[in-house]
Amino acid sequence: MWIWSTGFLAAKYGLPYAEPFILLTYRFGITLLVLLPIIIIQRRNWANSLSNLLHLLISGILIHGIYLGGVFQAIKWGMPAGLSSMIIGLQPIIMALIASSMLKEFISKKQWLGIVISLLGLYLVLSGHLANVTTLEISNASIVIVFVALFAVSLGVIYQKRFCSSMDLVTGTWVQYLGALVVCLTISMFFEAGKIQWEVPFIATLAWQVLGLSIGAILLLMVMIKNEASTRVGSYFYLVAPAVTVQAWFLFDEELTMVAMFGILLITLGVNMSIPQKSNSHNKE
């Protein structure tokens, strides 16, 4: 989750030099070019049916295109990165509700308690951000679009668990990025100027977004989705907001209060409680 959390900081670094969807267009396009030789050399298997291909495209549009596009656009419109990470931190609750209905995953009382404790810790961590931000500084559009991003990534993870669990990780991720690229490119062509300031900070953050996030972090996330319960994966997202807070303290000298540190402890406790324990069937007779 540390790598995943740097996405909010990467957005903060990169958006002064480019609009959100043209930035994501380059990010996804370069990622596709980097992954393609790996796929060819390793002779990876592609989706074996049109329906599987469609499922991958839909999950990619939700997880990458709408989610990242929404977060980046909200930050571009003035929403602080910390506040956006707090809202995205609601994801485990959304995922738990969807997973319990779509995937019939059982969520115990202990897990629900862990989710609530983590949510409380999340608000404590970011209470300083909220105290310094007035509602007048945040547009209604930025609030709406970040919640759209929240529901998109929550539904996307569940959708992938339900329909794409048998996919090859590399080729499946490639197809997902292709779907996200088409969406971001289309939005950029119709609603953005498409201009980029190719300066060193932008090139550096773009390189990190491609190698560290779109390849490294996402492939790790795909492995987690494939091998673990959706609620378990979702619980890890609570660690994003405290990670953003710690990194902002280290990189930008932002204040890290005792309240925030206590919130981080609550999040750690809550995540541990909300992770479903694997039952030992051998002990059940």
Image: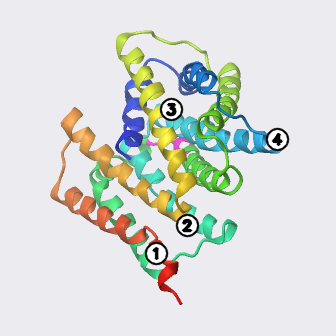
Closer to the chain start, of discs 1 and 3, is 1
Closer to the chain start, of discs 4 and 3, is 4
Distance between mark 4 and mark 2 Cα atoms:
30 Å
Mark 2 lies on residue:
96
Furthest residue to the right? 50
- Image-based side of 182 in relation to 205, left or right: right
**Magenta-span inclusion, residue 139:** yes
Compared to residue 210, the image places residue 113 above or below, namely below
Q: Position of residue 9 (x, y in %)?
A: 36, 34
How busy is the neighbourhood of tag 4: few (under 14 within 10 Å), some, or many (20 plus)? few
How busy is the neighbourhood of tag 2: few (under 14 within 10 Å), some, or many (20 plus)? many
Closer to the chain start, of discs 4 and 1, is 4
| Amino acid type, residue under disc 3 in the picture | Ser
| Amino acid type, residue under disc 4 in the picture | Ser
Q: Position of residue 128 (x, y in %)?
A: 26, 52
Furthest residue to the top? 198
- Image-based side of 231 in relation to 60, left or right: left
Q: How many marks?
A: 4
Q: Which residue occupies the foreground of this view, 182 or 142? A: 182
* Residues in magenta, as a range: 138-142
- Image-based side of 175 in relation to 97, left or right: right
Q: Main secondary structure of the magenta part?
A: helix
* Residue lying at 48% horizontally and 77% vertically, measured from the top left: 280
Tell me the mark number nearer the camera, choosing from 4 and 2. Answer: 4
Distance between mark 1 and mark 2 Cα atoms:
9 Å
Q: Which residue occupies the foreground of this view, 280 or 98? A: 280
Element marked by disc 4: loop
Element marked by disc 3: helix
* Residue lying at 68% horizontally and 57% vertically, measured from the top left: 162
Distance between mark 2 and mark 3 Cα atoms:
25 Å
Mark 1 lies on residue:
112
